[in-house]
């Protein structure tokens, strides 16, 4: 009898740990840190930086994102945005995105293996998705799509390297 009860307790504990390990909140904690990329973006050579960090008493994870772009014609600009992902135990996370182009989007994010897929925008307006995929503990690929009349169109993809902890 005691053995049966212990087996049930251990089984439930393992199932709980597996579910937690698969949650998007756990994945965000693996994203924590500063990530950089020197690759093309928005039609030009670019230097991109992402910083993922817990914030607001560890209730949220904040993403600060910036892309400094220089086009072939010499024109340059910086795109910047910020997102706050509400941490939780469920299979999806809610968040928002705001950027210096004036966009403000709700986000619904879910885990897909070692990737977080963020679906942003609203039906009938600007919609997109961003996939943040860990390739290793120190490399991440970020791919962006936007929904057009003809379907989904990829508009950006970069590989980021995690900076050494300071």
Image (cartoon, rainbow, N blue to C red):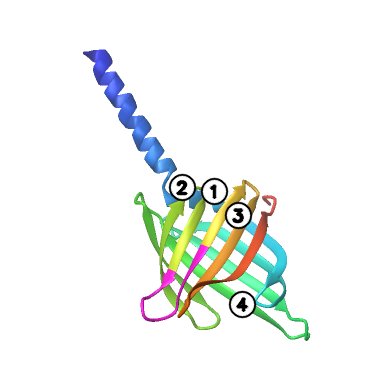
Please say if the residues under marks 1 and 3 sit with CB atoms less than 8 Å apart: no
> Mark 4 and mark 2 in contact (Cβ < 8 Å)?
no
Q: Which mark is residue 33?
A: 3
Where residue 43 sits: x, y (%)? 68, 78
Magenta stretch in the rendered image: 120-130
Q: For the residues marked 1 and 2, what is the alpha-carbon distance in whole angstroms?
A: 7 Å
Crowd tier of the residue under label 4, counting other residues whose Cα lies within 10 Å: few below 14, some 14–19, many 20 or above: some
Mark 1–mark 2 contact, CB under 8 Å?
Answer: yes
Residue 41 point in image, percent of width and height: 67, 72
On screen, 115 above or below 10? Answer: below
Choose mark 3 or mark 2, whichever is in front: 2
How far, Cα to Cα, is label 3 from label 2? 14 Å
The residue at which mark 4 appears reads as: 79
Furthest residue in direction front, as rendered: 150
Q: Which circle's residue, 4 or 3, is located before the other in the chain?
A: 3
The residue that disc 2 covers is 26
**Residue at which label 1 appears:** 30
């Amino acid at each position: 009898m005691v053995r049966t009860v212990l087996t049930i307790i251990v089984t439930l504990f393992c199932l709980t740990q597996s579910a937690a390990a698969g949650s998007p909140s756990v994945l965000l904690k693996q994203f924590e840190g500063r990530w950089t990329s020197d690759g093309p973006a928005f039609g030009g050579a670019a230097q991109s930086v992402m910083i993922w960090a817990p914030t607001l008493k560890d209730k949220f994870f904040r993403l600060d994102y910036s892309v400094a772009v220089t086009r072939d014609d010499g024109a340059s600009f910086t795109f910047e945005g910020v997102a706050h992902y509400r941490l939780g135990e469920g299979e999806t996370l809610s968040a928002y995105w705001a950027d210096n182009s004036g966009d403000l989007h709700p986000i619904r994010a879910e885990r897909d293996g070692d990737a977080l897929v963020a679906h942003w925008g609203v039906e009938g307006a600007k919609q997109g998705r961003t996939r943040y995929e860990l390739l290793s503990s120190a490399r991440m690929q970020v791919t962006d799509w936007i929904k057009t009349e003809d379907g989904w169109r990829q508009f950006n993809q970069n590989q980021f390297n995690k900076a050494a902890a300071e």
